[in-house]
Image (cartoon, rainbow, N blue to C red):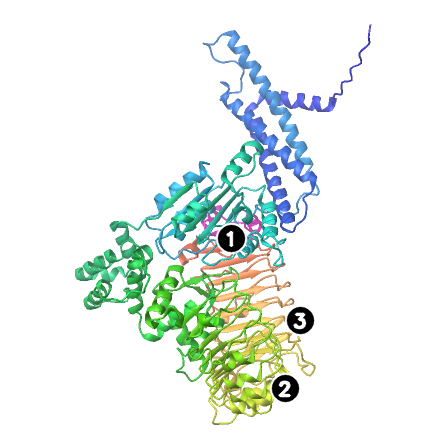
Amino acid sequence: MACINININIDVNRCLSELRTSLKLLVRPKSGIQKLEKEMARLRGKRDDIKYQIDLMEREGEIPIDEWIQWLREMEELEGQVAAIKQDFQSMSCFSCHCFNRAGGTSSQTQQAESSNFYSIILRMAKKLIEANELMSLTGAPVPIARFRPRRFTTRLPIPHLPPVGIDSYLNDIVGYIDGGEGNTIGIYGMGGVGKTTILMSIQQHYLLEDTIFDRVIWVVASQNCQLKRLQMDIAMGLGLKTLKESDDEQTCGDKLFSYLKNKACLLLLDDIWEHLDLQLLGMTHSATEQSQQQQQQKQPRKVVVFTTRDKAKCEQMNAEKKIKVECLNPDQAWQLFEQNSDGDVLSSDAGIKFLAEELAKECAGLPLALVTVARAMSGKRSWEAWKEALHQIRDKHVSTPIGLPEESLPMYKSFKSSYDSLENDLIRECLLCCVLWPKDYDIHKFDELIPCWIGCGIINDFNVINEAFHKGCYYLETLIAASLLEDSRRQSYYKAEHVKMPNSIRDMVLLMVSELKGNGRKWIVKAGIELSHLPSQEEWQEAERASFMRNNITSLQDYEASTFSKLCILILHGNHLSEIPPTLLTNMPLLTCLNLSLNFGIEELPKEIGSLTKLQYLNLSSTDIKSLPLEFGCLKKLEYLLLRNTRIKTIPNEIMSNLSMLKWLDIGGYFPVCDSWLNELKCLREEHHKISLGITINPANFEILNMLPNVSVWNLTVSGSESSKFSVHNLGTLKWSHRISDNLECLTILDVPGDELAINAGVDCESSFGCLKTLYFRRLGKLKNIRWNGVGFNNLHDLYISDCYMLKDVSWVLQLPCLDFLRISNCWEMEELISNVGNFNSSFGIKMLILFQMNNLHRISHQPLHFPNLKNINVCHCPRLKKLPFGTGILRSGLKEIIGDQTWWDSLDWDDNSNRDSLTTLFRNQLD
């Protein structure tokens, strides 16, 4: 007889532990379920930590730890098992009591069956409770260090420029389709200005506010002539994925995106598609059928794409399972939208005006952008006659329309034309036209790009000092924004909003307007931001009056034939990769008045033929690597504006500045102090010169020279000690701020100055020094402990930036600044309290935006009560010790709109009253979103 040995391994301790736990649960089974739920909640927190850490590793291109992957699998399995136990327990007849027997009416056999099921559930519950405890014990190390919510949203929510009237049905339809899992590709199509982007924004907002089925929601703008590689890089930037390189080809980028996103549920929102896109190369599954099979067989996370396009055919090309056409608003919705954007007092005050307004709204044919544009253009009009004239213009059958304008776009064009004609004057209209010189969907910096362009194009030219030019530019900007022809674009949440954007449909209309006004589409040639590698053929733009090729990849300029560009007045090559300028290109542009070559770091010298541009008035060579100016530069007799910011020019021919007798604005500021040659040239300026507005970076040792310069008004000043060997004083109190330095100074930066104290004294010959100062920067003052000023009011200071002042402990003096709107403090590591001494100042702090960035030791704003009557935005990033906000729910009545910060910081805040947290949570936005 054969002998069979059976080895049975029994974990006696585990069995005893399960038995003891089961006996306890028999007494109070409901509390056992609660205990199990509590343990699972703790595990979910650990799971989120691990997922976040894995995500960080994957974005860096690293391979996650195998133990973490296995832990997540076990956690997922345990969650399913616990959910089954809860469901079985809830279905038991004894769920509402703690006994095994039911009150009469049931047979003994039924009772035995239910008791058996109950005991089984209790045993399973005990077993899973022990497994949960064991799983938790495995997370001691090396699981993540800090708690973060998984980064669900990858791009900042855009701010819609149209109110969401009439889109509820579209939103509900699309969200229902997505949540129902019916398909994976949705195409939204319709004419320009009908509200497609607004619907897409509302979809993103929905998944921001609601619990989502997606790990990632990605927003990118495609636009016309968009390159696939640019889209890939935009997606990677939004994800924080660092493995994609500019040198990678499209397939390599696609593989990296797909590899990163393959195990994540994703919603990709693509705005404004013009061409078919390979979704697999964007990190998404190429085929909806393939994706469906993968989900069934391998339980692959879901990938959903929602895109907008003007062309229904693109929905077919993109294999959209659901196609949604966005129609114009019905009459009631159209009037509602028109009313929202009009002056209600005007409409209600005069029945005749209201009737005309209703007729105007009808003429917009339900097109949302047309309704908003016309309504806002008429908001300042209070006479019946003005409204009547507007209606006459928009109904005028004789209004010329551009060749090739689609019939469906006619209401939009006429509405835009009406709004355009309603602008205050031709200067503002010309400002609007200039905005098309930038790429589509481009965030244009108001002060570094747009207003200087208006000056360079000659639109703003009647001023004494450059301050006046920028004041006019700001007025024009506000007028165009109020008319909805431009919109504010807050590109980065940790800086002040200083960018604007032109809505795509408005840009389309402006380009048509230029074509109509000029009679020939080639009079203006705009090929900006479309990945050009070289200039067009000469036939394509030899008749152009204005040409913009900014933000492309042009590395060299062709050497065209002689006398090719006899009409060209404005040429913009900003933001390319040029290394040299062909001499004949300049000689072939005899009428050129405005030349922008900025942000071409490869340009090291100018050809002597620059002197042939005798009509040149505006030259921008900022952010180039030019080291010297040629002697022929002195031939530019009509040059009025010369921008050389962030250059390192060391060689300047003697008395070249004396030849530039028309010069009004010279900017030689930037990162480093100017060389002595520049200072010598400025000394040579004669009294008969125009008064020059100067932007300059100067060493403190040369500061006195500024006081002696004739006909110079300093507009933008940087005092930098970065290259100082002579400057040894420990504060700036010894500097003499004369009229020509302080009277028109709008921006002052102090950086790299040694010493532990910085003092600014009132001007020696002027009691009202710094009356124009709007912006003040303190940067890289590593030893600075104290800032003070004597006799200086700074009564017009609006923006204050303090960064990398590591020893600075306090900024109580900001309470002395009555007009301060914006305060950003970063990398001040020793600062524990922002305002430690309110003193005799009013406890009301009137700033509108407060940004605190990388303040490691900051633990409070102030220990004394402070009121924030005007605060709209607060942004706190990497301030781990700041545990309390300095206000309660009363801040909501003051108009607070947004609180931005790390999710970890927000979760760790201490609240005197939890209702404060509940009220303010609706305003909080994760810095990573």
Nearer to us in this view, 732 or 315: 315
Residue 912, magenta (yes or no) = yes
Give the residue type at disc 3.
Lys
Label 2 packing within 10 angstroms: few (<14), some (14-19), many (20+): few
Residue underneath mark 1: 155
Q: Which of the numbered marks, if any, corresponds to residue 176?
A: none
Residue lying farthest bottom? 687
Mark toward the viewer: 3 or 1: 1
Q: CA distance from mark 1 to mark 2?
A: 47 Å
Residue underneath mark 3: 783
Marks 1/2 in contact by CB < 8 Å: the verdict is no
Q: CA distance from mark 2 to mark 3?
A: 28 Å
Helix, strand or loop status at disc 2: helix
Q: Is residue 602 left or right of residue 375?
A: right
Residue underneath mark 2: 676
Q: Which residues are magenta?
A: 900-929
Give the residue type at disc 1.
Thr
